[in-house]
Amino acid sequence: MYSTRLPFLPGQATELLVVSHGSPSDPEPQERFVRRLATRVGARTGADVRGTTLAKPGALEAAVSGFRAPMVFPQFMTDGWFVSTNLQNRLAKAGLTAWTTLTPLGLNANLPDLALRRVRAEISTLGVPEQDTTLVVAAHGSPSDPRPARATEAFVSALKADGAFHNVRVGYVDENPSLEEAASVDGPAIVLPFFAARAGHILEDLPEALDAAGFTGPVLPPIGAWDEIPFLIAALLQRQRAAV
């Protein structure tokens, strides 16, 4: 069932499943990525942490084998259909009867502060003042579901509230404003990909859009691939432990 909790006892090994979308056309690279991510989270928490994708056939079923009532961390940037519906159905079909779905990566309250630190560190290497730099947030979006854009806009609003940059713009793969439009800027700019993994949109759509816009500035790795993310997930798990 969705968001079922069982009590955490001190010293008891917590079960955590990290789940990402994956790539149906080439599942292995993303499967390896999320498993490495899970290993790094486990090393920081002492929990039994496993990682898998929805894309690789049989992988989810294998990952939950032996789990009783895991916490589930969606390595997704939104709480859209894949997290709220597809993931829940897949977990039940995989044999789980109870689990707790944690806040997806893109909605984590600490993500904007992490992003600000990373962007500022990158800008500091360029010799350009922050207040003269435009930050372009590249995201997925969806023409049929408002939740992806809603999550992106909440993230962007937090970045804008800091007031550090000349401007903060957002562009989407699947809706307007487009990535090309967002990246068509004058003056210094940097791109922050609001994506969970280095996969198709990062490898294909984003470079194509930036080329079309004539963008030549720096492009950060996608947020989900940052070295800081295992610490973010570990902190979320520890807060969840303390709240039980």
Image (spheres, rainbow, N blue to C red):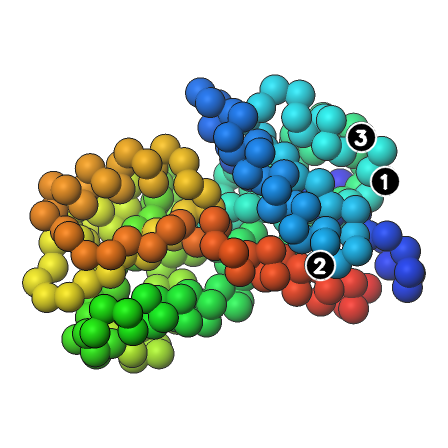
Q: Earlier in the sequence, mark 2 or mark 1?
A: 2
Which residue lies under the disc numbered 2? 44
How busy is the neighbourhood of tag 3: few (under 14 within 10 Å), some, or many (20 plus)? few
Quick check: 230 left or right of 191? right
Residue 226 against residue 242 in the figure, above or below: above
Q: Where on the picture, by quarter, is residue 163?
A: bottom left
**Where does the C terminus fall, quadrant-wise?**
bottom right
Q: Position of residue 204 (x, y in %)?
A: 28, 34
Quick check: 142 left or right of 67? left
Residue 142 against residue 235 in the figure, above or below: above
Q: Nearer the viewer, residue 145 or 212?
A: 212
Numbered badge on residue 68? 1
How busy is the neighbourhood of tag 1: few (under 14 within 10 Å), some, or many (20 plus)? some
Residue 119 against residue 229 in the figure, above or below: below
Circle nearer the viewer, 2 or 1: 2
Which residue lies under the disc numbered 3? 65
Residue 197 against residue 106 in the figure, above or below: above
